[in-house]
Image (cartoon, rainbow, N blue to C red):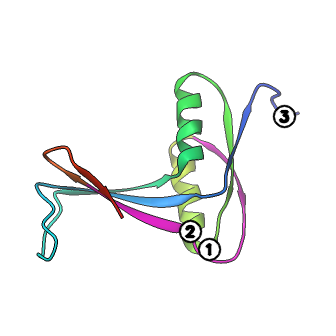
Amino acid sequence: MADPAALVVATPNLTLDRTLAIEELRPGEVLRFETATVTAGGKGVNVARVARALGRRAVVVTFAPGRTGAAAVELLRDEGLEVAPVPVPGEVRSTAIVLERGGRATVL
């Protein structure tokens, strides 16, 4: 039987986030990032992470398009989140988050 206390988090806009750290973003130049991290993301995913941090069970229900959607679902499971993926055509969206040492963030 399903846990009636579990939170169901609908996440229609799953994403594959690449978080990139750099000293300074200088458009038009060839730059090398200091670090790069790939995680699954989206607002609903963040809600599930907070619920878990507060000791609540959360089930993420999300569209999981294509191979990138399957990869994002596995990344969520690797974090220990419970996921109910819904296969759909296409591919999951992707973002690049550039974090500069000075604190500025640019999301592409």
Q: Percent x, y for residue 35?
A: 22, 56
Which residue is tagged 3? 2
- Verify CB contact (< 8 Å) between mark 3 and mark 2: no
The residue that appears at 51% across and 54% down in the rendered structure is 75
Q: Between tags 3 and 1, which lies in front?
A: 1
Which one is in front in this view, the residue at disc 2 or the one at disc 1?
2
> In the rendered image, which quarter contains the N terminus?
top right
Q: Amino acid at mark 2?
A: Val
Lower position in the chain sequence, tag 2 or tag 1: 1
Q: Which residue is mark 1?
A: 66
Q: How many marks?
A: 3
Mark 2 near mark 1, Cβ–Cβ under 8 Å? yes
Q: Amino acid at mark 3?
A: Ala
Q: Earlier in the sequence, mark 3 or mark 1?
A: 3
Q: Is residue 90 magenta?
A: yes
Task: Give percent across and percent down for residue 72.
Answer: 54, 59
What residue lies at 29% left-to-right and 57% top-to-bottom? Answer: 106
Q: Nearer the viewer, mark 3 or mark 2?
A: 2
Spot occupied by residue 36 in the image (x, y as percentages of width and height)? 27, 58
Name the one closer to the observer, 107 or 75. Answer: 107
In this picture, is 77 found above or below 4? below
Q: Which residue is mark 2?
A: 92
Q: Main secondary structure of the magenta part?
A: strand
Q: Residue furthest top?
A: 55
Q: Which residues are magenta?
A: 81-98
Label 2 secondary element = loop
Distance of label 3 from label 2 (alpha carbons): 28 Å
Going 12% across and 66% down the picture, which residue do you hit?
A: 26
Tell me which amino acid carries mark 1. Answer: Gly
Give the structural element (helix, strand or loop) at label 1: helix
Residue 68 is a magenta residue:
no
| In this rendering, position of residue 12 left or right of residue 2 | left
